[in-house]
Amino acid sequence: MTDAGYIWAVGRRKAAVARVRLYPGSGKMTVNGRPATDYFGGRAIYQASLFEPLRITGTQERFDVTVRVVGGGISGQAGAVRHGIARALTRFDEELRPVLKRAQLLTRDARVKERKKVGLKRARKAPQYTKR
């Protein structure tokens, strides 16, 4: 623990950035001042994703998680929160690192939207070709 009584980390995915704080507690998660289930609309895929780092390390009941997340959409924000929690857990206990690394939770997902190219309609879609 730091002097402030919490462990912090930053997680990123696509255009989303999540600042995560882990406090000693009972397993509650709040995102931008709201419970995580409310913020992410109760979608099961996001709920499973958010709690995955805590679940695989067996620390689900040990920490309360507070998150400030900005940018991107719902999917990117969920990924950023997951990344941030995994990084914060490694700051808490370096011995959790191999477990999180094996589950690929510490790797920043580098996939982002590809830029539009000149002469094309989108990143790769070309205008329709007409022979005559």
Image (cartoon, rainbow, N blue to C red):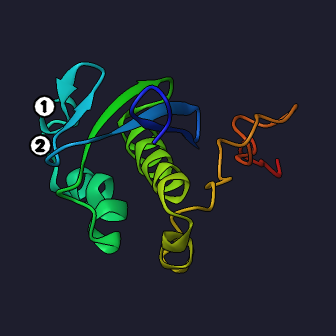
Residue 117 placement: quadrant: top right
Nearest the eye: 23 or 47: 23
Residue drawn at (30%, 21%), measured in percent from left and top?
Answer: 32
State the SS at label 1: helix
Q: Which residue appears farthest toward the right when viewing the image?
A: 118
**Mark 1 crowdedness (10 Å alpha carbons): few <14, some 14-19, many ≥20:** few
Residue 53: x %, y % from top left: 37, 62
Residue drawn at (21%, 30%), measured in percent from left and top?
Answer: 39
Give above or below for 55 relative to 16: below
Compared across the picture, whether 15 is left or right of 96 comes to: right
Residue 123: x %, y % from top left: 73, 42
Residue drawn at (43%, 49%), measured in percent from left and top?
Answer: 85
Looking at the rendered structure, the kind of residue marked 1 is: Asp
State the SS at label 2: loop
Distance from the alpha carbon under mark 1 to that under mark 2: 6 Å
Q: Do callouts 1 and 2 mark residues in contact (Cβ within 8 Å)?
A: yes
Q: Which residue is mark 2?
A: 42
Compared across the picture, whether 54 is left or right of 107 comes to: left
Residue drawn at (13%, 39%), measured in percent from left and top?
Answer: 37
Residue 88: x %, y % from top left: 49, 48
Check residue 113 in the rendering and tell me which mark sits there, or answer none: none
**Mark 2 crowdedness (10 Å alpha carbons): few <14, some 14-19, many ≥20:** few
Residue 27: x %, y % from top left: 17, 48
Q: Which residue is mark 1?
A: 38
Looking at the rendered structure, the kind of residue marked 2 is: Gly
